[in-house]
Image (cartoon, rainbow, N blue to C red):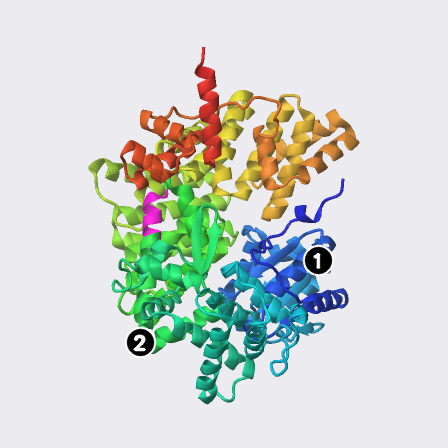
Amino acid sequence: MTTSVKDKPGNLPAELTSFVGRRHEIAEARRLQSTSRLVTLAGIGGVGKTRLAVRVAEDSRRAFAGGVWLVALGELRDPALLAETVAAALGLPDQPGRSVSSVLVDHLSARQILLVLDNCEHLLGAVAEFGEALLRACPELRILATSRELLGVDGERVLRVPPLTVPDVEQTPPLEAMSRYEAVALFVARATACLPEFVLTEANCAAVAGICGRLDGLPLAIELAAVRIRAMSAEQIMERLTDRYRLLTVGSRVAPTRQQTLRSCVDWSYELCAAKEQQLWAWLSVFVGGFELDAAEGVCPEELVDDDFLDAVASLVDKSILVREECGEIVRLSMAETIRAYGSEKLRESGDFPRAQRRHLAWHEQLVELAGSEWLGPRQVHWIGRLDREQSNLREALAFSMTASVIDTEPDATARFVNGMYTFWSSCRGQWGEARHWMGRCLTTADAARAEERVLMLYFDSVSAEMQAKLDEAAARVAQCRELAEQLGDPESLEAANYASGYLAVFSGDPAAAVEPFRAAIASAGARSATGSAPSRSVSRVGRQVGGLLGLAAASGLSGDEETAVACHEQILAITTPRGEHHFRAYSSWTLGHTALQVGETDRAATLTEQALRLIRQINDPVMAGWCLESFAWIAIREDEPTRAAVLMGAAEALARTAGSATVTLPYLLVHHDECERLTRDALGIRGYGEAFRTGAGMGVDDAVAYALGDRRTEEPRKAPVAPVLTRREAEVADLVAEGLTNKEIASVLVISPRTAQGHVEHVLSKLGFTSRTQIAAWVAENHKNRQP
């Protein structure tokens, strides 16, 4: 069976607007790719390098069995996180004991992959060194880079990206010949999108040619000009553009002409904005990688956030200053980097830049604090998605929090911020390298921070080091944590030190020595909870309690005390299930499912593993999803379904390779993997096993999960998932969802607030283990049918 181009792996964005021209550049880039493993598309800002690179990559997909992958570097400020950024784009989590670079080399060394490294100019040295190292180590890898400057790497081939072709301004071509000019075609396409009745005619032909010529064929400038067609004729645009250029002839005479032209166009767009829109443009430039409306409202000063705020934002979208992006049901707004840099200049000129940075930091600190307070609850999936989307802003805020101006006045800010982020980095994304990067910087720079926050960070950093198999570094952090906690003497600090000691013992291969520290910490936390004392840290007491129970479960299980391990996981479920939490509930369900399978309770094992996988599907944790697929394979062979077992093993292994992990990461489980593989091969034969295994390996993640859950068996009636019974109000909400009502409409019917309606819908999704409103509707229909006599 052949694989179509659209089914090949990769992450290229879909084109939302028509691609105009560039036939010669596409052909030349493909030719250079055939002769060199590193091709750089070089040119000034706004010339269309990124769009061209994406089109070339899309056209090249058939040649790369491992896919084509876009790595956006424009938002990355710290070159130390370059490898982590590339790994994240490829979907590779950290692996214990290995550097991210080595994980990348292993992943890329035997795969035919095209990496598109976009916007390299501000990280030139780091990208050059990194790219050269990858190319030397990975013979099948090819890189397509975009930059305003060359990378300067041996073997690099460069395509200078020119502006779009333009007609002669002095002698306008006839109307029938205008379409051959790329700049004209782009202007007409974008103008028509803004004003459907716009057409190129004999009357406006010269003006359009003049606009394209005076803008030197720069795509960004042309698109900014074309949007004005809503309010102005082509002749008026041309006239204003001419005036603007005359005004700017006394500007920087040493800058390249096209840079002056682009700046002229942006200057002109800025002048066409109302005063409030200009201020908003400047203030919104403080965001990196886009923002959502609540963030804009929280960061912008009160005088801008008034009744006209949304109108001003919408106007900036209409003027193409802001770009609207849909992330599922969420709308984000962003700026092209050139536009953002221009706004940042205006913000600095106004003297508001330091104030904007402070407000940006404060808002994102509050975001992380709120996420932490609701993490062990029904909104966990929401917060995982939100923090995912905000990573560029969070990095920007973290970096600013570590500057002298902040540390001198708010020494606790950085420590609280980093400790608040730890759960996200560790629980469901495995970003141990990123966590240690920021914790290391904070422990070095924030000496004046509260000692209690420092104790917590030393504990977190020790666990992160253990996950990277850096046990010497972990031991040093644990010693520092213990010493500081004993100096403080308060119960919370001593608990953190005990947790740190317990995990170090587990990772050091002495689980028996970990039991007592974990028991002491859990008992102390329980005693304080009984007295009603309030936690004083940025990470919730319940979160630390769950973490301690996980540690005690691991220590007990590895010490042979399976009864205590099971009791710990059941206690975790008792804590997390009523709260609607996903991640810890999924892990404990998976673990209990494995335990049930070992004592022969196959049905219970299947139920628990299904519950775990449905939860994991919602938080997009590929490593744990792979564990669940493997467990389903073990269940299948116990139920005499060898073909299903082989398919699931193939799917699990493929997912593990994609995630950069082993299929079974816990050594004591390898024996079960080997036994399942042996029994399945014996049942199917070498050929039959290979065919089934390859079928599973060829599945995408969604298909593999659906297969494991039985969702692909359309000939069988769908069974309602095992889940807690909905409350009366939740059942009402589910019925209204099934009728197709929005949250706002549900709120109106039930006379509740839209936020409350949203909370009810999220509770229903969580309890039923679903991810969409469509699934709720199907479940309601099935239950109504089953209730009929």
Label 1: element kind: loop
Q: Which residues are magenta?
A: 368-375
Relative to 11, 435 lies left or right: left
Residue at the spot of label 2: 351
The answer to whether residue 352 shows anywhere in this view is yes
Quarter of the view holding residue 671: top right
Q: Who's the residue at 38% across and 30% down the image?
A: 736
Kindly identify which residue carries mark 1. Answer: 60
Q: Position of residue 123 (x, y in %)?
A: 54, 71
Q: Is residue 481 magenta?
A: no
Dominant secondary-structure state across the stretch colored magenta: helix
Image coordinates for residue 120, horizontal then vertical, percent: 56, 69
Q: Nearer the viewer, residue 583 or 230?
A: 230
As rendered, which of 157 and 423 lies closer to the eye? 157
Q: From the viewer's perspective, is 522 left or right of 462?
A: left
* Residue ID at (65%, 39%): 699
| Image: 321 above or below 149 | above
Report if residue 439 is visible in the image. Answer: no
- Looking at the picture, does residue 695 appear above or below residue 43? above
Kind of residue at disc 1? Ser
* Label 2 to label 1: alpha-carbon separation: 47 Å
Front in this rendered view, residue 55 or 313? 313
